[in-house]
Amino acid sequence: MVRSVRNWAANDAPTYFALLLWIAANVLVFHRTFTEYMYEPRYYYLHEMLGLGLCVSRASASVLNLNCGLILLPMCRTVLAVIRGSTQCVGRKARRVLDGSRKFHMLCGAAICVAAATHSLGHFYNALNFSEHYNVKYPGVNAASHPKQDPIQVLLPTVPGLTGVAMVLLLLLIVSTSSLAIRTGNYELFWYTHHLFLILYCLMLLHPMRGVLKEQLNLDEHPPGCHMLMDKGGSNDTLNVASEPEPEPEAYIGLMPYPEPESEPLPEGSTDEFGRVVTCKGPPTFHTHAVEVWMWLLGPFCLYCAERVYRLVRSNSPAAISGIIEHPDDVVEVQLTKEGFGAKPGQYVVVNCPDVSTLEYHPFTLTMCPSSRDPTFSIHLQKMGDWTESLYERLLPDTDETDESLPVMVRRQYPTLYVDGPFGSPSENVFHYDVSLCIAGGIGITPFASVLNHLLNEGTKSSRLRRLYLIWVCRNITSFLWIAQVLCSLQRQAWNENRPDFLNIYLHLTRSRDVQILEREYPFLNSRVHVGRPQWRHIFDEVARYNPSTTVGVFLCGPKGMSKGIKRICLKKNKFHTKFEFHKENF
Ligand SMILES: NC(=O)C1=CN([C@@H]2O[C@H](COP(=O)(O)OP(=O)(O)OC[C@H]3O[C@@H](n4cnc5c(N)ncnc54)[C@H](OP(=O)(O)O)[C@@H]3O)[C@@H](O)[C@H]2O)C=CC1
Ligand code: HEM
């Protein structure tokens, strides 16, 4: 099957365009700074001493400034949720770019690591050159206190040196604990170490203070490289000049012959129209160069901090648990209410339970949103790690075995839960297509459960959606019980609203063949059960056949391995000219 350019353009073009913009911004800032330190007259003497190390260390610092500013933007989740929600002014393609915000955050993180390594190595090389190429004639430009000083001594006992080493160590800690293994195995460790970034940013603002790199101030009085005649006829060599004293001002006289070919190319303004070196009116004066890190960081940092304060205030009051329903396969449905809480189907919240962990917040997609008639919202929590296990045990009493086939309404003294959010997610786009295809693996059904509940509450004609396909793949038949009631009620409602082909359900069972449980309670669902993993190619062909020349929104939420094959099918050409636009839930 050939890949469809049209489908590629619909799926990946916006993301690749955003990526191209990011790469261009990095190349631009790197090039701008590199050439500035390579050719600007004010850095002539500095560049003469440090060479390429100066340009590379400074250019990588600009890349660090850019990405340390950008990396916070994808984490302003409330801002992103508002952008996603403003469907009138933000088109679907632009909103789909937001689906990659988490990946963009990691991309900036990777760029920060590379730039930090380059920047650090560049400065160690500069320390070496400051020591090797000490400028005796113009000591003001040096960072070393004497020729051949120990480079470590040149760099470390300075504000940039000490803050630089501390930042590298912090960055190593943040990055090493951001790995998927640690985020899934010990989220708390990731969470605490990741917030060391606040110290990292404070150190970044301190880092260039009392800097070691200096620019020349008096370019008019002393055109860089100009000729300062000494008693002995003078020399244009400003490097390695052994103990020659600074000449008196009156010693500077007349125009000089062309500069020696091997010397540093003179910057503009150092030679007259005949190419002869002009003479100086005085020695060069130097000052540490202007600090610009705050220009890059302050905006995003203030926006992020303002958002965190807003989120802190918003999530300060606990949510009231109005009901707990125990479902099969270690899933518990938590029904909540909270004053003023509103959310859209597909959105998610982050939940904190102080009884389990004070500072740890975990994301959960809403399975039911508050409606005009009922303020209740719900999440489905499955035992997956240490935190969910502890919360699960606090929500459910240690009762004897109950009949797993039926959800059990349980009432007890519940733990206090704080809910922060809601935050936007790709599944919000389900209602922005005529036809949507929702694919869930296991507990990945949660974002689509809120879509189904919304359609149940508001009616199947409450949006432009005229056909909804739901493919749900589970290991055990009992998992389908999590939202069996909603599925059957919505199917009935679609028939009552004279939309018999609105809801198309495919339930795939991969680890057992026992379908009796559904037969008794939910005969309609029983007829939708297929054994084994779905034949994606066949399913997509069927959807394309029944929806020719249509743009179908494909939404996936499930185990990692599920997305590759499905994304590939979305990008392929089909004979019905149906376009599949792929969205993936990923927290
Ligand atoms: N908003 C979000 O981002 C959310 C994300 N999730 C994610 O969803 C996932 C659900 O996990 P869990 O419930 O344990 O799922 P499981 O690991 O139990 O897998 C669920 C089903 O998916 C099937 N499956 C796995 N890979 C494929 C594939 N390549 N093609 C077809 N079917 C496949 C499995 O089949 P088989 O038995 O053959 O392996 C299984 O039947 C979690 O990783 C969770 O992080 C969950 C909720 C919300
Ligand atoms: C200097 C480097 C970094 C900074 C300043 C930074 C900053 C942040 C911030 C502020 C958050 C949001 C916390 C919150 O509000 O919930 C965050 C979350 C996150 N970061 Fe980073 N980060 C950095 C590097 C990285 C790297 C290198 C990775 C992984 C490769 C990474 C992965 C993550 C992940 C997975 C999340 C959680 C996202 C979510 O919950 O949606 N970060 N980071």
Image (spheres, rainbow, N blue to C red):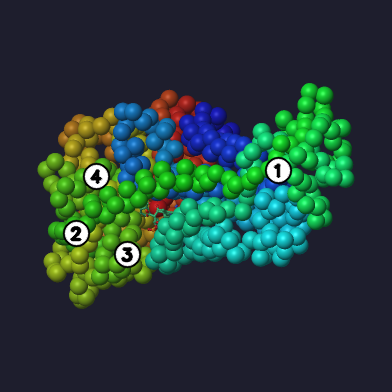
Residue named by callout 1: 283
- Left of 185 or right of it: where is 3? right
| Mark 2 or 1, nearer chain start | 1
Q: Amino acid at mark 3?
A: Leu
Residue 235 place in picture, x, y as percent = 84, 43
In depth, the one of 183 and 112 nearer the eye is 112
- Residues marked 2 and 3 touching at CB (< 8 Å): no
When asked about the image quadrant of residue 318, the answer is bottom left
The circle drawn on residue 359 is: 3
Q: Is residue 81 above or below residue 481?
A: above
> Do callouts 3 and 1 mark residues in contact (Cβ within 8 Å)?
no
Q: CA distance from mark 3 to mark 1?
A: 59 Å
| Residue assigned mark 2 | 318
Closer to the eye: label 4 or 3? 3
The CA span between labels 2 and 1 is 68 Å
Front position in the image: 398 or 163: 163
- Where's residue 87, x and y in %? 32, 32
Query: How many callouts does the rendering have?
Result: 4
Q: Secondary structure at mark 1?
A: loop
- SS class, disc 3: loop
Amino acid tagged 1? Pro
Name the residue located 40 percent from the left edge and 64 percent from the top edge.
192
Q: Amino acid at mark 2?
A: Pro
Q: Find residue 39 and report its horizontal and vertical position in percent.
A: 70, 37
Nearer the camera: disc 2 or disc 1: 1
Q: CA distance from mark 1 to mark 4?
A: 67 Å
Disc 3 or disc 1, which is closer to the eye?
Answer: 1
Q: Residue at x 50, y 36 (%)?
A: 18
How far separated are the C-alphas under marks 2 and 4? Answer: 17 Å
